[in-house]
Image: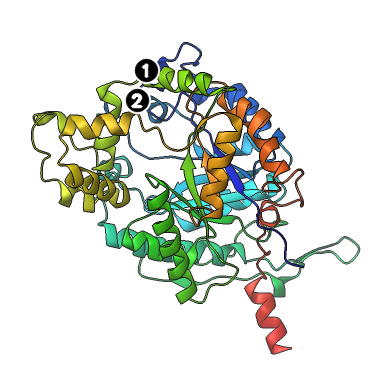
C-alpha cells in the first residue's frame, strides 16, 4: 500500500530576523543570534510541532551592509551540535561552503554531528557567492560561478566517499580476541581529482542513518543541474506559486532525465507565515512587520543578490542600472528574478527595493487560511514542503498551536515522528555502503 504523501516542514534559525530591520521589533532580543537559550526554545517548539528539521543558513563574509543576523551569529555545526543534546527527533541541517573547506574536515564534522544526534544530520551544500569571501581565506580571487560548481561536485563526491570509509559492521570490539576493527572493512578513499587529493579513511564510523541528508539551495541553471543530480532536498525561494510550479516541474524533470527515482529531490520553498486568530489580527500583524521596514531592508536584499553591489551610488528613482553581469557571478537565482521583475514593469531601484522589503505572499491570515495556502502549494505542484521563517516574535508558537493541528486533521502532516533517524522520517532510504555492495558482487 502506497503511503500518503505528507508535507515536510523545516524551520530556519534566524536569531534577530532575516531582514535588515527585524531586530528593531520591541520583542526582539538584539543578541538572539548568539543566544543559545533562545535557539533551544525555538528548537524544542519546532520539535513539539513535529517539524522535520531545523535549518541554519550561513555565509563567510560580512561588511557594513550585511544584515544584523549575519553580522553576529553562531557557526552552524557548533549550534546544531548543542541543539542535538536538547532535542530527540528533529533533523539538524547546517550550511557549509565547498569553496572554502576541505572535504576531510567537512566529512568528519558532519559525521560527528550525525553520531551526536543519533542520525539526524543534514548538510546544505553551498558554493559561496560573495566574492570578498576569498580575502578571509588567503585567496587571491573568488572562483567563478561555473568553477564553484565543478568544485562542489568533486567536494561532495569526496565527502560521501569518506562517509563510506567504515562498513557498517567494521567495528568489531572483540575484547577477548583483541580485535577492535576489522581492517578488511576499513577503507582508504585514495581520491585524486582536479581540486582535492584525499587518502582517508575517515576517523569515525558510519552513523545510524548511513550518511547525512544532502540539501542544496542553488537555482541558477548550473545550480539546478547540480541539485537534480546530487540533492535529496532543495531549499528554494520562488516569488509566488506560479514561479514555484515552474521551478518544481523543471527540477523534477531534470532529476528524472538523470535516472533518479522516488520523485527526488524534495522541493522546499521558503515561507514566512503570519498567523492571526482573525483576518483583522493577521492583517494587523503584517502591518506591524511593514512598519519596521525601511528602504535599507530592500536595498540590503538587492545588494546581497548582486554580490554586495552598492545601489546607493545611483539615482534611486532613475532607470535601473545595467548590473546583469554582476548578478551572473553572484547569486544568479535571486538576481535573475529581480531583473525579470524590474524589466516587466520598468521599476526603479526604490520601487523594487520596497517590494523586496515587504513581500506579502500567500501565507498571511487565520490558521485555516494559512493551512489552505500551504495545502494549495503542496497539492498543485508547487512544493513537497516548506522551510519556515519566523517573521515576527511569537509566530512559530502560533503556527504550532493552530496551523499544525489543521494540517494533521487534513492528514497532510504527521502526528508523531515515525522513525529514529532524520533520513527515515523524510522517507529516504539509508544508503548502502559502497564497499559492502562491492563485497556482495564479488561474493
Residue, far front:
279
The residue tagged 1 is 292
Viewed as shown, does residue 269 lie left or right of 432? left
Kindly indicate the quadrant of the structure image that contains residue 200.
bottom right
> How far across and down, in percent of the image, does residue 132 sit?
25, 41
Decide: is 306 above or below 350. Answer: below
The residue tagged 2 is 20
Q: Secondary structure at mark 1?
A: helix
Q: Which quarter of the figure is the N terminus placed in?
A: bottom right
Front in this rendered view, residue 404 or 266: 404
Residue, far bottom:
442
Decide: is 439 above or below 317. Answer: below
Residue at horizontal 42%, vertical 37%?
Answer: 361
Front in this rendered view, residue 334 or 31: 334
Please rate how many residues cluster around mark 1, counting C-alpha atoms within 10 Å: few if below 14, some from 14 to 19, many from 20: some
Please rate how many residues cluster around mark 2, counting C-alpha atoms within 10 Å: few if below 14, some from 14 to 19, many from 20: many
Q: Secondary structure at mark 2?
A: loop
> How far across and down, in percent of the image, does residue 343 sit?
17, 46
Front in this rendered view, residue 319 or 166: 319
Q: Is residue 323 visible?
A: yes
Amino acid at each position: 500500500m502506497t503511503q500518503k504523501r505528507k508535507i515536510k516542514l523545516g524551520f530556519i534559525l534566524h536569531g534577530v530576523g532575516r531582514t535588515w530591520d527585524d531586530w528593531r521589533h520591541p520583542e526582539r532580543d538584539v543578541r538572539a543570534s548568539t543566544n543559545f537559550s533562545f535557539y533551544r526554545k525555538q528548537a524544542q517548539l519546532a520539535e513539539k510541532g513535529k517539524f522535520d528539521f531545523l535549518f541554519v543558513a550561513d555565509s563567510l563574509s560580512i561588511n557594513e551592509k550585511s544584515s544584523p543576523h549575519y553580522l553576529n551569529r553562531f557557526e552552524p555545526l557548533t549550534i546544531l551540535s548543542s541543539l542535538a543534546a536538547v532535542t530527540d527527533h528533529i533533523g539538524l541541517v547546517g550550511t557549509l561552503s565547498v569553496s572554502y573547506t576541505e572535504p576531510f574536515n567537512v566529512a568528519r564534522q558532519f559525521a560527528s554531528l550525525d553520531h551526536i544526534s543519533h542520525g539526524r544530520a543534514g548538510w546544505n551544500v553551498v558554493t559561496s557567492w560573495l566574492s570578498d569571501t576569498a580575502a578571509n581565506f588567503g585567496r587571491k580571487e573568488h572562483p567563478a560561478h561555473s568553477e564553484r560548481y565543478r568544485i562542489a561536485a568533486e567536494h561532495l563526491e569526496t565527502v560521501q566517499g569518506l562517509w563510506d570509509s567504515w562498513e557498517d559492521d567494521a567495528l568489531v570490539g572483540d575484547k577477548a580476541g583483541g580485535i577492535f576493527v576489522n581492517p578488511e572493512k576499513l577503507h582508504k578513499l585514495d581520491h585524486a581529482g582536479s581540486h582535492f587529493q584525499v587518502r582517508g579513511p575517515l576517523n569515525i564510523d558510519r552513523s545510524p542513518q548511513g550518511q547525512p541528508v544532502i540539501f542544496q539551495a542553488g537555482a541558477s541553471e548550473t545550480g539546478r543541474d547540480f541539485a537534480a543530480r546530487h540533492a535529496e532536498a532543495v531549499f528554494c525561494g520562488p516569488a509566488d506559486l506560479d514561479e514555484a510550479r515552474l521551478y518544481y516541474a523543471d527540477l523534477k524533470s531534470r532529476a528524472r532525465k538523470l535516472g533518479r527515482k522516488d520523485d527526488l529531490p524534495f522541493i522546499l520553498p521558503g515561507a514566512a507565515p503570519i498567523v492571526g486568530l482573525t483576518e483583522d489580527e493577521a492583517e494587523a500583524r503584517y502591518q506591524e512587520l511593514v512598519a519596521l521596514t525601511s528602504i535599507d531592508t530592500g536595498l540590503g536584499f538587492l545588494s546581497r543578490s548582486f554580490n554586495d553591489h552598492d545601489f546607493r551610488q545611483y539615482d534611486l528613482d532613475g532607470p535601473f542600472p545595467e548590473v546583469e553581469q554582476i548578478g551572473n557571478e553572484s547569486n544568479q537565482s535571486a538576481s535573475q528574478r529581480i531583473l525579470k521583475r524590474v524589466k516587466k514593469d520598468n521599476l526603479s531601484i526604490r520601487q523594487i527595493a520596497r517590494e523586496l522589503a515587504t513581500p506579502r505572499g500567500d501565507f498571511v491570515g487565520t490558521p485555516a487560511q494559512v493551512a489552505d495556502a500551504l495545502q494549495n502549494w503542496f497539492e498543485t505542484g508547487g512544493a513537497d514542503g516548506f522551510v519556515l521563517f519566523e517573521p515576527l516574535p511569537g509566530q512559530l508558537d502560533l503556527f504550532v498551536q493552530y496551523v499544525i493541528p489543521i494540517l494533521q486533521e487534513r492528514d497532510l502532516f504527521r502526528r508523531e515522528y515515525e522513525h529514529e533517524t532524520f533520513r527515515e522520517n523524510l522517507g529516504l532510504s539509508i544508503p548502502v555502503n559502497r564497499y559492502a555492495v562491492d563485497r556482495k558482487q564479488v561474493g
